[in-house]
Image (cartoon, rainbow, N blue to C red):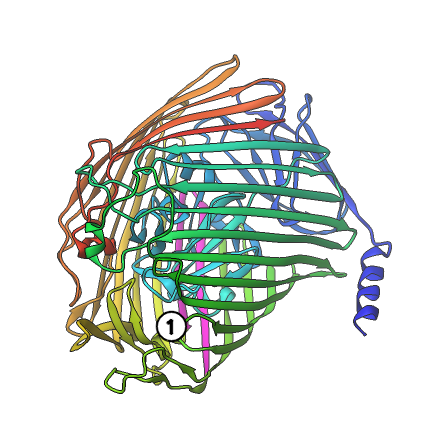
């Protein structure tokens, strides 16, 4: 039966349906010249073209439909437009406006691609090149530069993103178009993903459960893979970064090629970091980390079927503290990368297939994938204590039809997931989870207004199994993890409005809801976790956590300034959090998972000044402020108010050296004097950062070199979201990074 299905699918994809061409020319608005090597991208089709010496570009064999197209070129503003392809189309002359070349991409919201203005959601994006040029030590550290985004860290290697005060299972990470689960139920379990092989990260702020499902109640981290090579080319590159504080190095190399019908990519990387030093030049023993990364991808375009098949492998190690007494252990060599002390080892394998089927007057998107996650907690002496295998089988299917001014999508998402313990110690039980959903989404496109919204229904089943604890002393808080079997269901929706092109303004208003069931730790944990120095007890009777969020955004754009301000009010019903008790077990405090209604509210603002026809000066500023409260208390892990300000001074050349820029900046994090019950207040701190970069081009390759200094004054400080502060350990001191990338054209 399966054989017949695949034969029919192949025949369907190969039958003779009409295909069209799309072409045009690109020129400068200020000079009567056509531009060569402009990147012309159709993200949905994974196609990239470059203009020739006459400014011309052409795509062949494209199915009819609506597409977003992006034009980008150094020294010019990125231009995004849409086309409705019903026949072969000549776009004519496309003019690119000179001025500050702000990096702007077509954003992905669910299965839709659009200009940032043409969605009611608040979405931020940051490219890998930006993250690396800021000296980021990992992916979470890189996106924490954005307003409203922070990181909950346990040293320099273990960190997870925080969006508007929410993290872990309240934030959904999307990889290859599918939800990604890295067993983030514990505070010291980081995101664990590298920036190797990705193009950028998009952050959807606020509930996005309509199109992403459960655990997107706080936002979405959408990781976008690197673009295909331009058609009819083979490209290769190698990149390496050195970090002075951790004596660390990260290197990756890749090669990719493409033509009109076929594309492929291969990339591999490695990073290795020793222990970090704080602002007092004091080494933090066993804060080291490192990993190995590999990716491969192959895609094809068969008339009415576009496919991209991906594979990813990572193996990561993260040292951690079981007890502050460890800091007094005899240290090993300062440059040591060994993991003889307590550490996490995380192995990850992902296989996915992303497909678009073009039907007669609509299209069908089908993403399927398998994720295998093995997390080990080794307590030293090569003794594996915690050892869990999480297998996830996932699917997303969306049917989209475009009427005159309406895009209508119907979709379903689901997964089947199993958790298995094979170590000597158990914290959460063996379990099985199944989730399925159905949603409908409408987007109304008018000349200056976008109206979008929809409804979604989700069902989840969780079943846990009897899983013995290694400690059977009846005086402990629990001898065995009690199994349970339960079902959850939820109805969610959103309604949003975006008004744009009225002068220079963009006004957005969005009301959305989200939900999640408790994770396995919150529902059923019963054990001592040395990484958190707590004995944690779950509650299988926890209710569904839901939220209702109102978000308002106002943006302004002109030839000399881009500015934005947003405010949000997020009301939570049955917010789940960990609360201390007055009980102890063998000297460790016992914590229980409890529920209360809660509110998180805040504001964000940005201001980017770049005077008209002054390409050498750019002043970037951002500010964020968040308050989180529950009945009679403040919520834990709420970031302190933060102000960032950077000045970028750029000089362009016409020779082999094409650009040099210098970017000094400051980060001021205010005092956090609204701690939760088991937190401490955190003083304000001030960081000075600087970056110097140079780009060079010749006929065979392009080279980018940058020197970045973070915490240039080597201040000793505690970040409020650093879990090390409870051990009296400061954050990372001065770190100077040298980045080098060469691309072979």
Q: Nearer the viewer, residue 207 or 660?
A: 660
Please report the residue visible at 67 percent of the width from the left and 52 percent of the height from the top: 308
Q: Is residue 218 visible?
A: no
Image height of 6 relative to 143, above or below: below
Image height of 337 relative to 674, above or below: above
Residue bearing mark 1 = 425
Residue 9 rendering spot, x and y as whole percentages: 80, 63
Residue 312 rendering spot, x and y as whole percentages: 57, 52
Which image quadrant: the N terminus? bottom right
Please report the residue visible at 23 percent of the width from the left and 47 percent of the height from the top: 330
Task: Bin the neighbour count of mark 1 within 10 Å (Cα to Cα): few under 14, some 14-19, many 20 and up.
Answer: many
Please report the residue visible at 43 percent of the width from the left and 62 percent of the height from the top: 376
Image height of 121 relative to 708, above or below: below
Q: Report whether 634 appears left or right of 38.
A: left
Residue 497 rendering spot, x and y as whole percentages: 44, 59
State which quadrant residue 342 falls in: bottom left
Q: Is residue 395 visible?
A: yes
497 within the magenta span: yes
Q: Nearer the viewer, residue 628 or 238?
A: 238
State which quadrant residue 361 falls in: bottom right
Please report the residue visible at 46 percent of the width from the left and 68 percent of the height from the top: 388
SS assignment for the magenta stretch, majority: strand
Extent of the magenta region: 488-515
| Element type at mark 1 | loop
Q: Report whether 553 appears left or right of 498.
A: left
Residue 241 rendering spot, x and y as whole percentages: 43, 33
- The mark total stands at 1
Which image quadrant: the C terminus? top right
Q: Report whether 650 appears left or right of 2.
A: left
204 within the magenta span: no
Image height of 517 relative to 91, above or below: below
């Amino acid at each position: 039966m399966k054989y017949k299905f695949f034969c029919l699918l192949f025949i369907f994809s190969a039958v003779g349906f009409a295909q069209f061409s799309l072409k045009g020319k690109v020129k400068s608005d200020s000079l009567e010249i056509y531009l060569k090597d402009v990147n012309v991208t159709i993200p949905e089709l994974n196609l990239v073209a470059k203009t020739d010496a006459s400014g011309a570009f052409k795509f062949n064999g494209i199915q009819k439909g609506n597409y977003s197209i992006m034009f980008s070129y150094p020294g010019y503003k990125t231009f995004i437009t849409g086309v409705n392809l019903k026949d072969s189309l000549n776009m004519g002359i496309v003019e690119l406006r000179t001025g500050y070349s702000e990096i702007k991409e077509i954003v992905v919201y669910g299965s839709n691609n659009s200009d940032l203005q043409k969605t009611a959601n608040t979405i931020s994006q940051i490219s890998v090149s930006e993250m690396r040029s800021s000296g980021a030590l990992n992916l979470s550290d890189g996106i924490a530069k954005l307003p409203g985004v922070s990181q909950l860290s346990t040293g320099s290697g273990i960190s997870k993103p925080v969006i508007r005060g929410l993290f872990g299972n309240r934030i959904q990470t999307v990889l290859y178009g599918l939800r990604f689960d890295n067993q983030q139920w514990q505070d010291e379990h980081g995101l664990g993903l590298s920036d190797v092989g990705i193009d950028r990260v998009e952050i959807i702020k606020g509930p996005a459960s309509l199109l992403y499902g459960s655990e997107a109640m706080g936002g979405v981290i959408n990781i976008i893979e690197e673009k295909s090579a331009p058609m009819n080319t083979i490209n290769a590159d190698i990149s390496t970064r050195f970090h002075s504080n951790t004596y660390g190095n990260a290197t990756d190399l890749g090669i990719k090629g493409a033509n009109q019908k076929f594309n492929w990519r291969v990339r591999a990387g490695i990073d290795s970091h020793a222990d970090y030093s704080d602002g007092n030049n004091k080494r933090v023993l066993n804060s080291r980390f490192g990993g190995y990364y590999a990716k491969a991808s192959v895609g094809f375009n068969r008339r009415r079927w576009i496919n991209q098949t991906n594979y990813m492998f990572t193996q990561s190690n993260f040292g951690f503290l079981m007890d502050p007494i460890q800091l007094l252990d005899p240290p090993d060599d300062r440059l040591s990368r060994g993991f003889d002390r307590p550490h996490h080892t995380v192995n990850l394998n992902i296989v996915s297939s992303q497909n678009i089927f073009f039907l007669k007057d609509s299209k069908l998107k089908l993403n399927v994938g398998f994720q295998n996650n093995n997390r080990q907690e080794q307590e030293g002496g090569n003794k594996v204590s915690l050892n869990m295998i999480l297998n996830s089988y996932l699917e997303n299917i969306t049917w989209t039809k475009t009427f005159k001014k309406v895009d209508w999508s119907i979709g379903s998402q689901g997964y089947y997931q199993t958790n298995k313990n094979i170590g000597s110690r158990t914290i959460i039980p063996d379990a099985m989870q199944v989730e399925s959903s159905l949603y409908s989404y409408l987007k109304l496109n008018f000349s200056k207004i976008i109206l979008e919204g929809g409804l979604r229904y989700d069902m989840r089943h969780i079943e846990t199994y009897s899983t013995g604890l290694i400690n059977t002393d009846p005086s402990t808080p629990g001898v065995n993890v009690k199994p349970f079997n339960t079902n959850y269901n939820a109805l969610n929706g959103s309604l949003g409005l975006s008004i744009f092109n009225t002068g220079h303004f963009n006004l957005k208003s969005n009301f959305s809801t989200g939900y999640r069931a408790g994770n396995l730790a919150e529902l059923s944990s019963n054990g001592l976790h040395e990484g958190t120095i707590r004995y944690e007890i779950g509650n299988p009777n926890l209710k569904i956590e839901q939220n209702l969020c109102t978000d308002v955004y106002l943006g302004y754009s002109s030839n000399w300034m881009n500015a934005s301000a947003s405010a949000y009010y997020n009301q939570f019903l049955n917010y789940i959090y960990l609360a201390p008790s007055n009980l102890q077990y063998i000297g460790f405090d016992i914590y229980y998972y409890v529920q209360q209604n809660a509110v998180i509210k805040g504001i964000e603002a940005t201001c980017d000044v770049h005077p008209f026809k002054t390409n050498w000066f750019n002043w970037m500023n951002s500010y964020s402020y968040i308050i989180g409260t529950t009945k009679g208390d403040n919520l834990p892990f709420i970031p302190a108010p933060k102000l960032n300000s950077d000045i970028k001074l750029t000089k362009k050349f016409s020779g082999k050296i094409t650009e040099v820029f210098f970017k000094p900046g400051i980060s001021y994090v205010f005092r956090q004097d609204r701690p939760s019950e088991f937190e401490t207040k955190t003083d304000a701190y001030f960081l000075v950062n600087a970056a110097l970069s140079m780009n060079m081009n010749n006929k065979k390759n392009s080279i980018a070199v940058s020197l970045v200094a973070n915490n240039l004054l080597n201040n000793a400080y505690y970040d409020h979201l650093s879990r090390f502060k409870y051990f009296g350990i400061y954050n990372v001191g001065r770190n100077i990074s040298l980045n080098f990338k060469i691309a072979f054209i």
